[in-house]
Image (spheres, rainbow, N blue to C red):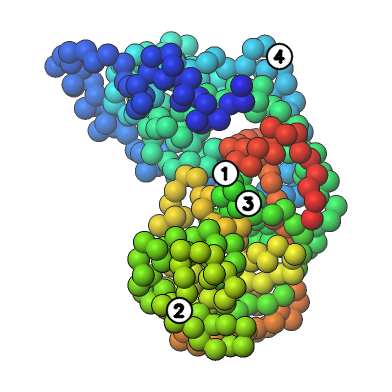
Amino acid sequence: MRLNRRTLLRSMAVAGASVVLPPAMARAESIWDMMARDRVLRNADTAGASAAAQALIETQEPILSYDTAYNLQLAISQYEPFVAAGGWEEIPREVYGLRLGEDRDGGIALKRRLISSGDMPYVERVNNLIDPATDAGIRTFQARHGLQLTGQVDEATFYAMAVPAATRLNQLYLNLQRVTNMAATLSERYVVVNIPAATIEAVEGGFVVQRHTAVVGRVDRATPILASKIHQINFNPYWHVPKSIIRNDLIKYMNEDPEYLAKFRIHIYDGSGNEIQPSQINWQTEEAVQYMFRQEPGAENSMGHCKINFHNPHDVYLHDTPTKALFGENARFHSSGCVRVEGVNQLVAWLLRDNGWDLSRVDSTFASNARHDEALTNPVPIHTTYISAWANRQGTVSFRDDVYQFDAQGKVTFEA
């Protein structure tokens, strides 16, 4: 059975776990337990542990480059003998929920797991107490797997820890081939959208100059793999609702709330450009698909303050968004194929540098809500990619979930 979060949790439920993974059986806490826990909590620098974990992954090396291919080869040379020796141990369900200061069954297994993957320094003897070193190890593990640095073995962290070392080695093999195949096509300056990581890198001279959190396509509306060039920025754009969204979403929303279009300032037009009123459409059918739906510029606009255009047959693009909370999630796969960009103003300023724009001008244009289209003097290459494992020069190896199941299919090359 292919391992994913759903099958993992289902198998644990069959084995006797409840819907929510339980902690180990509670035991009476003595005064000595309380004093030990309080001492651990007082001496812990969780903010410092998170900062150290971030520093391990936030280097200037691109996810997609010749250097990445070399670093992946080094990682493979370390993983191969480890996997041949059996890899890390399977973690028990008692590990779920553990966090700083707790002292219960599962602590020893957690420490052994963190030590075996290099997230925690080796120690001769381990006990169940989750001390600051273990907390730092959890945060390092979370950083390497693109998870929120909570310091707790939450669901996403537990799932990532349960993936066998052999599966991770296979990811390294596949991604080495992907990176090697693409590295020769890279230029001096380019943008990379890495779908499994839901991140964007702006690369120049072999170094990452900007890194952005992104929201990419969900499984049933995947962001396509492609190579193109960014050629235009639309400031404060109209949003023309794609027919797929009209059919799959908008009709449903109008049946639930007849004022939906008015609330989000969306107008309807026929093929001659005449405005149609919502009351003229039969929302119990797919009649709406034959019309054009256009959302006005402004705070509610689904593209926010800008749209970043590049030629492609899929009608996808990068854009701003009014829904900023999604950037804080572990799994950022919510869009209909397009890519939302956190801190998009900084990326736009970098893209328009040769046009004489700076961040101040971008911000003021956003704030004006005025429509403006700016063609790039020098179009910038963009690559949307599927890299689910990579490594940097420090030896830090990062992994992501195989969200589109391309690793499971053994895919190395993709159609443009």
Looking at the image, residue 360 lies above or below residue 124: below
Give the residue at mark 4: 84
Mark 2 nearby-residue class (10 Å; few <14, some 14–19, many ≥20):
few
Residue type marked 3: Ala
Sequence-earlier tag: 3 or 2: 3
Give the residue at mark 1: 57
Expressed as whole percent of the image width and height from the top left, the position of residue 237 reads 55, 79
Q: Are marks 1 and 4 in contact (CB under 8 Å)?
A: no
**Whole-Å distance between the Cαs marked 1 and 4?**
27 Å
Sequence-earlier tag: 4 or 2: 4
Secondary structure, mark 1, is helix
**Whole-Å distance between the Cαs marked 3 and 4?**
35 Å
**Residue at 71% over, 14% down:** 84
Q: Are marks 4 and 2 in contact (CB under 8 Å)?
A: no
**Residue at 53% over, 76% down:** 293
Judged by depth in the image, the label closer to the viewer, 2 or 1, is 2
Judged by depth in the image, the label closer to the viewer, 3 or 4, is 3
Residue type marked 2: Gln
Sequence-earlier tag: 2 or 1: 1
Judged by depth in the image, the label closer to the viewer, 1 or 3, is 3
Is there any visible trace of residue 15 in the rendered image? yes
